[in-house]
Image (spheres, grey):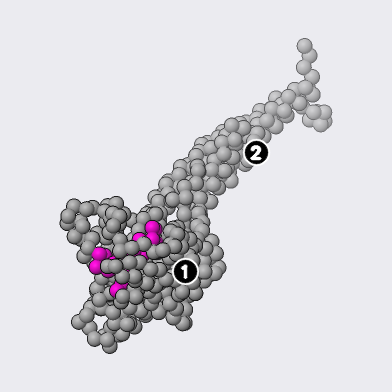
Amino acid sequence: MRVASMMMTNRYLKQLNRTYEAQTKLMEQSDGDKLHRASDDAIGYSKYLRYGDSFAENNQYQTNVKSAISWMKNSDAAVQDISDALKTIVEKSNAAQDTNTTTDMQAIAKEMLVKVQQVVADGNMQVNGRYLFSGQSDLKQPYSMSNDKFQRGLTKNLDDKQTAFFNQGTAPSKTASSGNLSQMLTLKGSDGNEYYLNTMDGNVYSKDFMDNGYKDKMAAGQATVKAGDEAGTASGWGGSTDVSKYFDANGVINSDGESFSSDITVGGETVTLKFSTIEQYIITYSGDNNHFSMVKENGATQPATDTVNMNGIDLAGTSIFDDANSGNRSSGAAAFNDVLTVVAMTDMGNAAWMSSDGKTLANNSFEIVNTSQSKLAARQQVYTDCQNMLTTQNESILTDITEVHSTDVAKLATKLMEAQTIYQLSLSVGSRILPPTLADYL
């Protein structure tokens, strides 16, 4: 077969172009990336795209977690300050005993009130213009304290032994409604005595029974309250939801509550009962009771651990006036209004009430805030652990991306030298073996 000089030249140039193309592709990798198009390595490019999506997703999760941790750290600082203020109030309530004069009690009350004002200020803490404790209504200031005083229902606050006696041996949670009993409403009788209304069933108990009688029952082997222990039953009381007929969610009595009366028979005599109230300042909550979450990882959402913020119920719990049994919506300020009751009683110089109910109520409010802080700390720890996991995962994804996409510089340098050498040799060989042109003969 005859091989024409043109054929030899074309084949040589074709091979030379392939050598140059290979060298050019290697030169493209000098920017540090060995993949510039899918055709460079279809499988590798597919992995690179998947890793890129994972990297972007991981970065978003890390952003969420950082924002959540920042929010919770600021919340924790505010709750800690609230806890410290309530702790001081507990200490002051323990000091407000009958050994103090009226002037001493009023001075203690003023110190307590300053601490409550500090609690309100901490409850209105903001981060980047958003209120920490307003729920999802985080552009609305959550807490405000009234300038005037209102008549608020007076509660009987059961201690641990009393709550166990009235709840079949189990003390209910003080931080949220559990369907059990931890408070009663105080009633004043026409006989001059004090009585207490169990809002769950309408039974009324005497002060003597609540102070000493139940102890005698327990000493005799009776573990829980039984029929016949009550002094009587409030006529017409329809159940715990009747609380909302006479009091609002903050415990302020309405006109129906002021006109309420019920008769019971004590020792053969008719005793007319009316609600007892205390004149005090009222704190109102204007936020909502919703939460928001910041998704921190793949999979189903976990409301118990994904929740970032605290609302009024989380922070201040509920009371007999706004729990799920009351018929009222949650006030979001229950513990704080209970503390204001302690302040009002101290200002009145009621050392007897302070030595029993006052200390219990102040301690319960302090416990509610402490419990909320513990829950917040637990969620914050979950996010912190997740942040560590995401950081490790991010490093792993970056390693995968580097392996599939980045250039091995040492290997590239070697290949470039090889390609350049081959290209130079091709040029040198071509110059020697290609047929001479007519110009070479002339």
Q: Give yes or no for residue 184 being in the magenta stretch.
A: no
**Residue type for callout 1:** Tyr
Q: What residue lies at 50% left-to-right and 42% top-to-bottom?
A: 299
Q: From the viewer's perspective, is residue 148 above or below residue 17?
A: below
- SS of the residue at dot 1? helix
Q: In this rendered view, identify the residue nearer to me: 125 or 332.
A: 332
Disc nearer the start of the sequence (2/1)? 2
Where residue 22 appears, as percent x and y from the top left, is 64, 33
Quadrant where the N terminus lies?
top right
Q: What residue lies at 38% left-to-right and 77% top-to-bottom?
A: 278
Quadrant where the C terminus lies?
top right
Left or right placement of residue 321 versus residue 271 in this view:
right
Q: Rounded to the nearest whole Å, what is the CA distance between mark 2 and mark 1? A: 75 Å
- SS of the residue at dot 2? loop
Left or right placement of residue 227 versus residue 138 in this view:
left
**Residue type for callout 2:** Arg
Q: From the viewer's perspective, is residue 251 above or below residue 178?
A: below
Q: What residue lies at 30% left-to-right and 64% top-to-bottom?
A: 231
Give the farthest residue toward the left: 219
Where residue 411 appears, as percent x and y from the top left, is 51, 36
Residue occupied by mark 2: 37
Q: Which mark is residue 246?
A: 1
Q: Is residue 171 visible?
A: no
Magenta part of the protein: which range? 193-210
